[in-house]
Image (tube, rainbow, N blue to C red):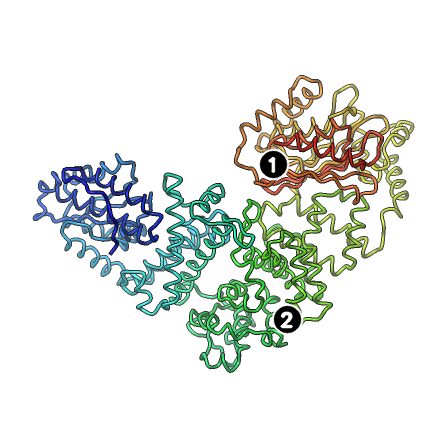
Amino acid sequence: MVSTTYTVESRDMDPAAILKQRREALFESAPQMASAEFLQAHAELFDDYFRQRFAISQIGPAIAINRNPYAVVALGGYGRAEQCVYSDVDLLLLFENAVPDAAEDLIREYVYPLWDLGLEVGYATRSLQECVKMAKEDLEIMTSILDARFLCGISSVYADMTARVRERVFARVPHKTIRALVERNRGRHRHYGDATFLLEPNLKEGAGGLRDYHTMRWIGRIKYDLCDLRDLEYHGVLSSREYESLFDALSFIWRVRNRLHYFTGRKCDQLYFDHQERLAEEMGLVEEDGQLPVERLMSELHAKMGFVKQQLLLLLFELGFEKPARRSFGVRRQPDIPGIEVARGGLGFYSSNRIVRSPILLIRIFEAAARLRMPLTREAGRLVREFGYLVDDDFRANPDVRRAFENILLIPAGPVNVLELMLETGFLVRMIPEFGGIVDRIQFDAYHLHPVDRHSLRTIYFIKTFADNPPDGVDPLCIKIYNGLKKKHLLLLAALLHDIGKGRSDGKHSATGAQMAPAIMERLGYGRREAEVVSFLIENHLLLVKTASRRDINDEETAIRIAREVGQVNLLKMLYLLTVADSMATGPKAWNNWTATLVRDFFLKILGILEKGELATSGAVRRVEKKKAYVRRESDFPGPEVEAMLEVLSPRYLLYTEARDIVSHIQLYRWLADQPFVWEVTPEAASNTRTVVVCAKDRPGLFSKIAGVFTLNGMDVLDAQIYTWRNNIALDIFTVTPPPDQIFEDERWQRAARDLESALTGKLDLSGALADKQARARKDGTSGRPNRVEVDNETSSFYTIIEVFSYDFPGLLYRITDALTRNGLDIWVAKIATKVDQVVDVFYVRDEQGGKVDAPGRVAQIREQVLSALP
């Protein structure tokens, strides 16, 4: 029994006033109470309110309870006595016979005072017959009755309802009823997502949320006539340890939900990114082991919700509602491994003695699960946890264990995620203790959608799909490379370990992970050369995507430098597949059509250098001459005019621009005449971007004004190549996102053209217009990281590379480029890499004399000027 001290109320006080006073007192003492204790105490306050209302009712006596008995019944979370801070209060007035007209007056007496207090109260008035009929037809009503709890009135009416519903609904078609619950559960998961994989989980409706626990209760009620969660333990469905772990997980979720309700001041079950830091602070969490308080909060929440999800899945599987996929032709139904059997549709051990005598069974059962596409039984999972201590260094170094582990990695992805089973039973951490440092570890940013451990498993999953069942949109090149790859197991091991360094707090996870890998590989029985391959892939798993998005991949030096770093074709192919899978597993913000195209093109350039040994410099003159010949042949212009144009085109432009594009650019130049600018917009279907070629007379600030106009019209610049011809003509090629409303895209481009003309002629105050746009944008999108400017004079022989790290906001690119222009710098290449709220803008620049900016004083001045332009 919960014991809570409240202030003494006057007997003459209205029940609603008493309730308000008691709730305020309860909320003050809530931080010192256990979660379940608070929920029950909160529900009891409403119990007292309704019983007081029943006792002093003016309407009740007029209904003649002796002729038409009725009961007041709690439903939903209130019925379960799990009343969170701002959860709805659901009420049923249940009449033995027909609902009288006076029932509405009774509801007005009971419910209206609660509405006046600002509480969300749902109610229904039904006869006993209506309740039974509606429970048959409506799943929502049926589950509300499963949670029903008698409050006051005539208890026999409530007892009759529960008995009739059990007899006429559950007892007749229990399997059908549970199947309907399971299907609704799956639909809910599809809609709200897997909370154990999301950084903004829904505490109630997502997979692993409270609804999964409710579903367990409802199934227990239907199948076994259980009344309480603990009855699942008494009935043998859960072990004592599993029940305690489940109750601990629910208590934590309830605690988070109550806190979220309390400081948002309303019912709120979606744990939005913006609430998480404050919630962690209010729950008293502090930084520990390099994890921020908010990261600790989300790590524990994901672990607890993962346990709830797993317990529901195990229950459904054991009851036959989560069956393994049908076996395909040639897949054997029996594991054919002594000591392992198929039991109740899953894989289990003959006995625990077999495990003690032959510990290799601990990994053999997972190998069989991958091959047969079957999960483990609940008992098998318990035994794996219990005998995990048998996984020692001798076990790991066993060649048979290593081969079994490789088979698990190599077997194509199926409906049963065996690596996830290994993680949930603790076996994966037993095999690779360092993996424990990233289990349920959260990175608090809007870029990484999943905890580090789950992200690593998703990376392996995507690589395995390249074998025969790739997701929509995957480049066929990935399939071709993977199926022709040698030593696939090394790629998969690198994928498993690529973020292992995030378990350490040094902030350099790639290098740290590469240092950790040799010891892990040696422990698993691999040789030095295999360890070197895995270490290289871990250390460089971000190399391709970072270079492609932050460096000029048209610059021959870029591809040559990466080719020299990688050195081997097979290693490059592994690195490319790891890059693709890692980015896909991170989320849509990390891998989209534009990024995929960029990385693929860069990979092919490097591959060409490694396979053919062809350096750009060796064929540069020949390629330029070929392009000139193409322009002479395909142009509609008179010969002398073509020759004159070829003379003014810059060597860099001729080298990096396709011949057919040169022809169209010369035509664009002819259209320029006396206009401020002309442009051509081309949709790129493969990357869902727009290529905008702008031709204008060169002038200071041209690039920044173009970038500002794109921002003003809702288009983001992804990439830019800036060319200046010898006749003072600027030919700038932008890759941008489409306008927000693509139905009216033509109109938006026309407006953008008018804006650019006004900006170039001085009629539009671009700075002011962008400031207004920024003021209207969300102000809570900052990343929390300080602005940073890096100046690199080493990577390129001809340009200074300036990298600007900041949070994204409308007009950022304009501000940066305007500051660079005011510092007398010419921008030749711009690369924009955005991670949701974090942006990295990279510029290849030269000074007024066409040289690099390498004087220390000048570098410091540029850094200071750019930082001063940022908020």
For the point 63% across and 71% down, the residue is 524
Q: Are marks 1 and 2 in contact (CB under 8 Å)?
A: no
For the point 46% across and 74% down, the residue is 348
Left or right of 629 in this view: 502: left
Q: Is residue 201 visible?
A: yes
Query: What is the x, y in percent for residue 134?
Result: 26, 50
Query: What is the x, y in percent for residue 760?
Result: 71, 21
Q: Is residue 671 visible?
A: no
- The correct choice, above or below, for 27 with respect to 491 in the image is above
Which kind of residue does numbered mark 2 sit on? Arg
Between 597 and 354, the one lying in front of the other is 354
For the point 31% across and 46% down, the residue is 29
Left or right of 253 in this view: 97: left
- The correct choice, above or below, for 325 with respect to 76 in the image is below
SS for callout 1: loop
Which residue has dot 2 on it? 523
SS for callout 2: helix
How far apart marks 1 and 2 lie (CA) works out to 44 Å
Query: What is the x, y in percent for residue 276?
Result: 47, 45
Quadrant location of the N terminus?
A: bottom left
**Earlier residue among tags 1 and 2:** 2
Which residue has dot 1 on it? 808
Which kind of residue does numbered mark 1 sit on? Asp
